[in-house]
Amino acid sequence: METLLMLERITIKSNSGPYDVEFAPNLLNNFVASEEGVTHYLVDSNVARMYTNQLASVLSDPYTLLIEATEDNKSIDSIIPVIEQLVNNNFKRDHLLLAIGGGIVQDITCFIASTLLRGVEWRFVPTTLLAQADSCIGSKSSINLGNVKNILGTFLPPKKIWICHEFLNTLERKDIQSGIGEILKVHAIAGPEAFDLLKQDFSKLISDRTTLLHYIKEALLIKRKYIEVDEYDKSSRNIFNYGHSFGHAIESATNFRVPHGVAVTIGMDMANHIAVMRGHLPAEHRDRMHDVLSQNYFDFKNIPINPDSMMRALLKDKKNTATELMLIFPVGEKASMQRVSVAPEEDFYSQCVQFLQGIGA
Ligand SMILES: NC(=O)c1ccc[n+]([C@@H]2O[C@H](COP(=O)([O-])OP(=O)(O)OC[C@H]3O[C@@H](n4cnc5c(N)ncnc54)[C@H](O)[C@@H]3O)[C@@H](O)[C@H]2O)c1
């Protein structure tokens, strides 16, 4: 654990050039506005409120725009006024965008950076666990259309990422659980050994920052292996959708009352249960993972998930073909992640209902 804690920088190879994730524990002690040319800041409004003093130089900048981090604002309609403001502020090709916030501000900034003036540079200070441990690397932007989640998007990594774990101190418990959901997913993809090591430390993730920081770094290193090979998600990176097709459908069916990473946690448990019911996975693997997964979504078990609404959302998932659902299941003795096509027929529907009834949703 100590070796990883000393790691100060991770470099990611991307089709648009390498970029660095820098671990900057003291970032908030001396947060100076960027000195590299003209920078336009997009800042999560809650972060601006909680870190008014530390971010004073950014918040007093005339080019700073505040964004309320809601799924409604992560939509094409809500992004247009933000673009209008940037254009009114005379945004030019050699200007930079700098996002300070979680996955929502990241998705909005990345989408704007990839489309405004046909592409401009952006940088990122992730302030949530999910964004620090997972979404900050990988180049994707994802934008909602109505309640169809993440149906629009682009690929453009930030040129630089600074991770300061001090931001995590003000997160609500649900947002820590959401980030832990993605950390669990990445470790499940790495294999049973990696998942079981994380499982041993699971109870410390919320209470012990050093352990959490270790797993943030570990999760980024695991993800790097996949995004460097398949940045545009054409083949091997697909397995990162483990838990996501179900997760997005759960978010839509609950009107986003379940945070993203928690919905993904339910989605992983659901994928495991259905994989066993369909004969893809030995039951021991489902059981080995179920206790930590269910602990991570325990607080959300009482939010009802209507199976019809979930199924409607699942059918709209962007990874499907015209007739089949494309789902990621752990398969076989090694629980290795594989893409499996499933006909959305009666038996699949009843397997989903059986799982939802089993967890009391
Ligand atoms: N592009 C990608 O690769 C990718 C990957 C995973 C998830 N996502 C998307 O990310 C979104 C979820 O992002 P998220 O979990 O980071 O949360 P978020 O951006 O929705 O933020 C969650 C809440 O935490 C608040 N917040 C942010 N930083 C804070 C801090 N330091 N202290 C206190 N409150 C803070 C926000 O204002 C918000 O209320 C989803 O829309 C999901 O689809 C994108």
Image: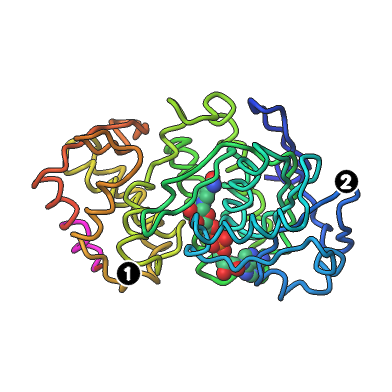
| Picture residue at 46% right of the left edge, 45% below the top | 152
Helix, strand, or loop for circle 1? loop
Structural crowding at the residue carrying mark 1, measured as other residues with C-alpha within 10 Å and reported as few (<14), some (14–19) or many (≥20):
some
Q: Amino acid at mark 1?
A: Lys
Confirm whether the magenta stretch covers residue 357. Answer: yes
Q: Earlier in the sequence, mark 1 or mark 2?
A: 2
Residue 352 can be seen in this image? yes
Confirm whether the magenta stretch covers residue 102. Answer: no
Residue 261 at x, y percent in the picture: 46, 56
Please tell me whether mark 1 or mark 2 is closer to you in this view. Answer: 2
Residue 209 at x, y percent in the picture: 67, 61
Q: Amino acid at mark 2?
A: Gly
The figure's colour scheme reads rainbow
Residue 307 at x, y percent in the picture: 20, 60
Image vertical order of residue 219 relative to residue 263, above or below: above
Structural crowding at the residue carrying mark 2, measured as other residues with C-alpha within 10 Å and reported as few (<14), some (14–19) or many (≥20):
few
| Picture residue at 71% right of the left edge, 64% below the top | 65
Residue 61 relative to residue 297: left or right: right
Answer yes or no: disc 2 within 8 Å of ligand 1.
Answer: no
Helix, strand, or loop for circle 2? loop
**Marks 1 and 2: CB-CB under 8 Å?**
no
Badge 1 is on which residue?
301
Q: Nearer the viewer, residue 258 or 265?
A: 258
| Picture residue at 66% right of the left edge, 65% below the top | 44
What span is in magenta?
354-360
Residue 204 can be seen in this image? no
Badge 2 is on which residue?
37
Answer yes or no: disc 1 within 8 Å of ligand 1.
Answer: no
